[in-house]
Amino acid sequence: MDSDSDSELGAERWMVETIGMYKDLHEFDLQYPTRVTEWIGEKSVCVAGYDASKTNEIVQLVVPQKLLVSENQGLCAERDLKVECGGFTKQPVYSLKHVSQQVGLILTSSPGSPEVQVWQMGAEDHGAIKPISCLQSEANKDTWIKIAARDTSSPQALHGSQINNVHLTEIESKKRIYTLAVESSEGVGSLSFLDVNSFLLCSLRGRLVLADLRQPGVASEGSLSPALPCSGHWVASARPGHEDMRASIASLSSEGHIAVTDSRNLANPLKCAKQNFPETSKSEDFLCICWAPKLEDCISVSGLDGTVQIYNTQSWDQTLAEKEALFSHTGHSVMGECEDGSEPRVTCHSWHPWKERTLISAANDGSLHMWDWLDRDNQRP
């Protein structure tokens, strides 16, 4: 029996064994792998290629109707992705952020490029994604500009590749309205807004910086706890607080370490864990960690192997120990294969903005999965 037959049998067996763990599971093959999946509203998602050797496509895809309907809606005719609009870029897309559905803007960045590209979605004949301007930033050949965006009366972009070159810029006027006053050439792992007045920076070494846009020159900082190794690269995701509540920050390292930190005390993580994955799969390329927008205390991580792991952090403590995942999506590693015969690695994933257990994930073999996982105890975690 050849390897293709073995792979097909393995995928069929996986489907039989796991189908009861999903409410819905859709598998698609893109024409190219993507490392960005950005929801555009609740019905479509934006993806883009990252191949440095050729022209790459940026497309907005409408997701299957079946994934969006409520319970007991019967059969849905549409089960495929539909291209809503698209465009081309000569650069590989490593970061992509949606700014505003009302004005239809997205931002992209590429390795080594000193610019953030601004695109208009649905330009001209409503079927095109067109570049309309650039925001000047700084980047060297070994990194790329990290981006966060917010939709205000005048949409703004937060961008930078090193701590000392992070800026907040008005997209239309290109006016810089804030510069992070922290002197460090350390690389930026991720950027995210906490609320309208503050943002979070996670450095590649795991250093957290919290800045208040109303107070130029003032920033709170916290280094990693001694219990957490500073080797490898780090990224972080912020879950905004409500009213006077604190924000929670989840950090992930390429060594598989996870930390949950209170925004009021950046130097001392409240909870720690170690993700269980093969040592040979260590990578710094595709790290991704997200808070579930509709499930309390749930985070998801990917990029270390071919899976997306979902954890409930409620019972975690400061003990750096392996934790059992609440749910593991292994479909990319079981159902796909890269051109060189290796097991696919998940490049990115994201949660649907309001469907509490629906996610989209992509892998470096060009596979794109949309799935709605079931709570096996039929209870909220």
Image: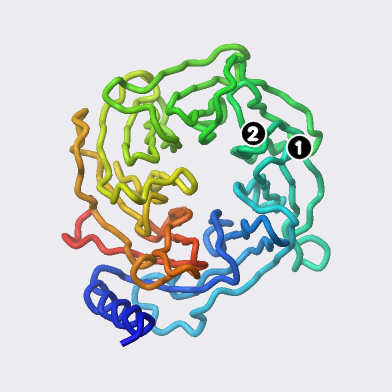
Q: Is residue 379 left or right of residue 338?
A: left
Q: Quadrant of residue 296?
A: top left
Q: Quadrant of residue 163?
A: top right
The residue that appears at 71% across and 61% down in the rendered structure is: 54
Q: Position of residue 14 (x, y in %)?
A: 27, 74
Residue 166 position (above or below residue 55): above
Residue 12 position (above or below residue 206): below
The residue that appears at 66% across and 69% down in the rendered structure is: 84
Q: Position of residue 227 (x, y in %)?
A: 26, 24
Q: How is the image coloured?
A: rainbow
Residue, disc 2: 159
Going by the picture, which residue comes out furthest to the top?
A: 217
The residue that appears at 35% across and 49% down in the rendered structure is: 300
The answer to whether mark 2 and mark 1 are in CB contact below 8 A is: yes
Going by the picture, which residue comes out furthest to the bottom?
A: 1
Residue, disc 1: 135
**Callout 2, which amino acid?**
His
Q: Quadrant of residue 327?
A: bottom left
Element class at badge 2: strand
> CA separation, marks 2 and 1?
9 Å
Residue 56 position (above or below residue 227): below
Q: Is residue 108 left or right of residue 4?
A: right
Along the viewing direction, whichever of 170 and 366 lies nearer the viewer: 366
Q: Is residue 32 left or right of residue 70?
A: right
The residue that appears at 36% across and 18% down in the rendered structure is: 267
**Callout 1, which amino acid?**
Leu
Along the viewing direction, whichever of 104 and 158 lies nearer the viewer: 158
Q: Earlier in the sequence, mark 2 or mark 1?
A: 1
Element class at badge 1: strand
